[in-house]
Image (spheres, helix red, strand yellow):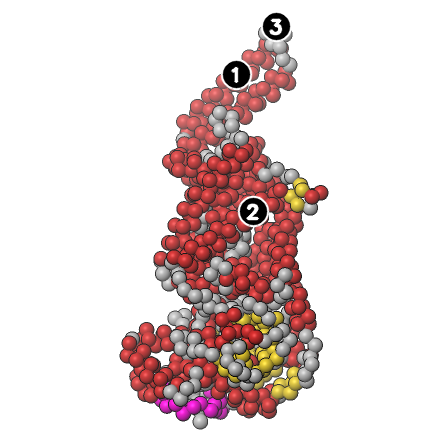
Amino acid sequence: MSTHVEPLPASRHKLVALAGNPNTGKTTLFNALTGYRCRVGNYPGVTVETRKGLIRSEDGLTPHTLLDLPGTYSLAAHSADEAIVLDALLGELSDVDVPDVIVIVIDATNPRANLFLATQILELNRPTVVALNMVDLAKKSRVHVDAEVLSQRLGCPVIPVVATKQMGLDLLCQAIDKADASPDVTVALDWPSEVTSAVEVMHGILERVANGKDRLALKAELLQTLLGDGGYHEQRWAKRCGDDFRLLLRQQRSAVVKNGDSLASIEGDVRYAWIDRLIEDTVKRDEGRPTGTARADRILTHRVMGLAILAILMGACFQSIYAWSTPIMDAVDSAIGAGGALVSAWLPAGPLQSLIVDGAIAGVGAVLVFLPQIVVLFLFLAVMEDCGYMARAAFLLDRWMGLIGLGGKSFIPLLSSFACAVPGILATRTISDRRARIITMLIAPLMSCSARLPVYMLFIGAFVPDTQFLGGAIGLQALVLLAMYLVGTIVAIVVAILVKRFLLKGDTQPFLMEMPPYRWPKVRTVFHRAYEQAREFCVSAGTIIFAVTVVVWALGYYPHAKSIAVAHDAQRQAVTAEHEVVLLEIERGGDGVATSLDEQTLEMQAKLSRIDQDEAGEYLRQSVLGRMGRWIEPVVAPLGWDWRMGTAVLASFPAREVMIATMGTIYNLGENEDEKSVGLRDKLKASRHADGRPIYNLPVALSVMVFFALCCQCGGTLAAIKRETRSWRWPIFTFVYMTTLAYIGAWLTFVIASKLYA
Amino acid sequence: MVSQGVRSLRQLRAGDSACVSAIANHRTGAKRLADLGFVDGASITMVRSGKPCIVRIDDRLVGLGLGHQEVILLSA
């Protein structure tokens, strides 16, 4: 008999946890129930953090809080994402209470495999509801599950649902609302007597340190600890109770395996024996179901054809980033230029106009121009994830990743890092091998993220010739872009090999990953994913980048000494006076004047324009930013950079997107009014040293791009590494090695390219 | 062949099916395999052989590296 927990008042607000195997549609169900669409993907490891939402209830039900958990096959946690599930269900997470109700999502097309986790969760003795998802696909595959009998045998409600079509959700909400007691019957598994005795012994000793936990839940946890050799449960109890616990566990494990049983297979044998009896009574299936997945896999997982298709897909992605986005990008650029001109005309000259035009519009606008590329990149990744192809890519690359000491599972976090390293680092939670996980985190920031793309696009567009090869099929600019992505990837390979060889030695765990069935990507999910990322990018542009831009503007604008204005006004008056004298000469028909009136006026305007530019440049040189820039100039000079570039790079260490914004502000501040409407790309092309030499050329552009490809200019990434490794050691290591490599790489690029370019 | 009458998953050819007889050792990976259904008597089909391979167990396709293939023993 189970011990029932105290019934809750019917309308009490509850915390409802959503648990289940990966690929069972948990996140889709979460979205359907809450209306809050979070990221969904058809590969293991999309939900690597918990997320909350309020259930949109009808019929006046209380809007309970729903907690989406990462997918897991078992409560015997071995990886960080599985540990989160366990902690959440046991109420051990610092910011989440013990769930009042657990909803177990079971894939109706494959109930046997899903019931393993379900039986483990039922043993935790919490009010539970089973959501039997994808019953439509099960019907198509001729699998029939008798929900009523299953409900009787499991001792909890079993509700058939189709999360993608929002079917059965009302019944599910009602069941959640009513679920106030623990399961009616205990799942009575046939454990060997040695296991039952060992759990009793451990329970007797550890009950007093368990802080009043439910007796059955504690026993279930101790069972997992006993049978999960080296797992997360064992580590947690050992941390709490020390060496005495390890000794107790060793003794009990020896008692369990003394008759020759394998500790690892006891739980599987016992649970699947029980599940098989249950399946006999509840599931009917016709054999010989057609499988489109098997046909697709014949090609997509083929060692040669599969890799070729993967290479073509990657190539198409990079080409589309460049080709599809350019027209939209040009339109955004023009709109921002027009906006700046409009504000300039409307606001009187002074600090406010300068702040808005030179700071906000030029800075944030320079970043927003690159939104189209980011949307294209995320659309591509979202389609790959949603259709189930990502797991195949990991499968195909496992052998190759093995050469650098990593496994195929590292591929997904590394591919995600091409969009942004932060979710990439979170996605490493699915890697159970600790060493492989840390190495993946260390090299993830070397994958060229979307924030680097604007820098590449700016410098490639301005300084790499638009040469076409093979009748226009391949362009030099796209090849240089690809090369920048390769620089990071090749360096990552070398770093991974060195770290594995010298810092994190040991064998790599073999590949183990479910290949989810292929599904057509859902248009809404894919576009929503791209929209969410685009929104995040805009929010970042509107907050961090805007803040840094304003600081950079202030440093570049002040002290704005009056003496500079006085000196230049004197020069303007002199030019105007000289012009008036010449005008008088012309009117008199003097012999000394060889040119016409129009030519004289043009000459005067040119002189005034040069004075304006001198004045703007002088303000910038005398500003706090200008002085700071000259301090760091000796450090960046070997890389071929001038002080403005050095300042922009320095400002972009917290977040590399800031670089373009800073350049936009610095160059706008340093220009006269007429040139402010010209894009940053043209300003860079036109900028000259005092002796007339161009500041930027191809070697400088390559040096800047290589620096950005290798440098760790992202506070978010370092914070993520710190959080995931729970140590300062790895973020510091990442920052130091990447910054050093970036400096050396940029210097070598500049020296070699200058020799070749000369 | 691991021993007479016993072979590991590694020896199974694409398209062939067999039953699991045991998991060969007690490492952490063995528990994960057992939890996924690789238990005594489970029927599996090799979908794509090699390193790694893909097998079908229940209605689930699972990619397995060489280390796992060697510890999954099949009945004769």
Circle 1: residue type? Ala
Q: In the shown orientation, is residue A487 left or right of residue A166?
A: left
Q: Secondary structure at mark 3?
A: loop
Q: Residue at x 59, y 13 (%)?
A: A583
Q: Secondary structure at mark 2?
A: helix
Location of residue A127 in the rendering, given as x and y in whole percent from the top left corner: 48, 84
**Chain of the residue that carries numbered disc 1 in the rendered image:** A
Q: Which segment did they paint magenta?
A: A177-200
Q: Crowding near pointer 2: few (<14 within 10 Å), some, many (20+)? A: few
Residue of label 3: A591
The answer to if A182 sits in the magenta stretch is yes
Tag 3 or tag 1, which sits nearer the N-term? 1
- Residue A269 versus residue A389 in the image, above or below: below
- On the same chain, marks 1 and 3? The answer is yes
Circle 2: residue type? Ala
Residue of label 2: A483
**Chain of the residue that carries numbered disc 3 in the rendered image:** A
**Chain of the residue that carries numbered disc 2 in the rendered image:** A
